[in-house]
């Protein structure tokens, strides 16, 4: 990838050269498979899309599009495992900027989305907290019906698994506890459990979880957080 970047830097037309190299058969044979494989290992659940969290990640997307920033065509931190819906139908080469020319989309390789987006767990929808959160929800259509329903389902499944984890832990059955943590980590919509863990530490957590105080207690337990956080 470093050799490819040097090639692009020296090319008279960097954008055209970056596009050419990215689809070149040598790159497809010798660079792409490793890149795709590493991103698959890093993706949440079973290789879920790093934008929507729901579909299988089938494509390697350039977060900063090649047309805009050809020097980043082979920059490791510019690659995101994405589903074809997010990559080819929603984001495409769109890359909105604010009035100062700064990117509006939240970069999933480098940024915590929490300051920009609040997931309303009961309805599975994102409430944007900043213009960047708003732009990200809009471009990826993150509040569309199927995603919201999937997040509500993941919320209920996670609650049930957390209860099972707590029961197994109380009995000293660590294998069973690990099993229930793995069930959570394997399911799509990893953003749901991360939101639950973040919101459990929110100053308003008692209000957010007022219908299930036992769940809040479990979500604050270091053992559960270690098993689930940032997996
Ligand atoms: Zn997606």
Image (cartoon, rainbow, N blue to C red):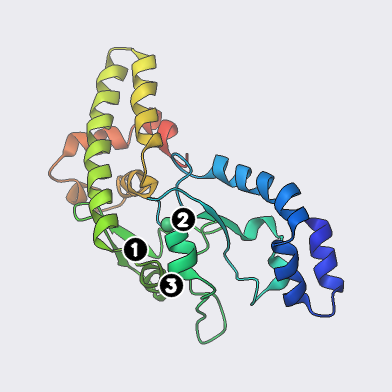
Mark 1 vs mark 2, CA separation in Å:
13 Å
**Mark seen at residue 182:** none
- Residue under numbered circle 3: 132
- 155 vs 142: above or below: above
Quadrant of image for the N terminus:
bottom right
**Looking at the image, do the residues carrying marks 1 and 2 touch, with CB atoms under 8 Å apart?**
no
- Residue under numbered circle 2: 83
Mark 1 vs mark 3, CA separation in Å:
13 Å
Residue 143, quarter of picture: bottom left
Q: Marks 1 and 2: which is nearer the front? A: 2
Residue 114 pos. (x, y %): 40, 58
At mark 2, the secondary structure is: loop
Confirm if mark 2 falls within 8 A of ligand 1.
yes
- Residue located 20% across and 56% down the image: 123
At mark 3, the secondary structure is: helix
**Looking at the image, do the residues carrying marks 1 and 3 touch, with CB atoms under 8 Å apart?**
no
Q: Marks 1 and 3: which is nearer the front? A: 1
**Badge 2: residue crowd in 10 Å (few <14, some 14–19, many ≥20):** many
Judge by depth and name the residue closer to the eye, 37 or 194: 37
- Residue located 35% across and 30% down the image: 183
């Amino acid at each position: 990838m470093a050799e490819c970047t040097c090639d692009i830097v020296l090319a008279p037309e960097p954008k055209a050269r970056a596009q050419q190299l990215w689809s070149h058969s040598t790159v497809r044979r010798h660079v792409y498979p490793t890149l795709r494989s590493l991103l698959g290992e890093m993706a949440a659940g079973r290789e879920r899309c790093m934008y929507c969290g729901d579909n299988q990640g089938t494509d390697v997307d350039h977060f900063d599009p090649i047309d805009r920033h050809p020097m980043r065509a082979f920059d490791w931190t510019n690659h995101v495992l994405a589903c074809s819906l997010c990559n080819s139908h929603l984001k495409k080469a769109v890359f909105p900027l604010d009035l100062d020319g700064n990117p509006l989309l939240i970069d999933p390789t480098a940024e915590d989305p929490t300051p920009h987006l609040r997931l309303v767990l009961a309805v599975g929808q994102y409430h944007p907290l900043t213009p960047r959160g708003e732009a990200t929800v809009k471009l990826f259509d993150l509040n569309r019906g199927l995603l919201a329903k999937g997040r509500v389902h993941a919320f209920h499944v996670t609650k049930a698994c957390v209860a099972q984890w707590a029961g197994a832990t109380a009995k000293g059955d660590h294998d069973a506890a690990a099993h229930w943590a793995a069930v959570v980590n394997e399911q799509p919509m990893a953003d749901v459990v991360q939101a639950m863990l973040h919101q459990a530490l929110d100053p308003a957590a008692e209000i957010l979880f007022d219908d299930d105080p036992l769940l809040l207690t479990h979500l604050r337990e270091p053992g559960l957080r270690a098993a689930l956080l940032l997996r």
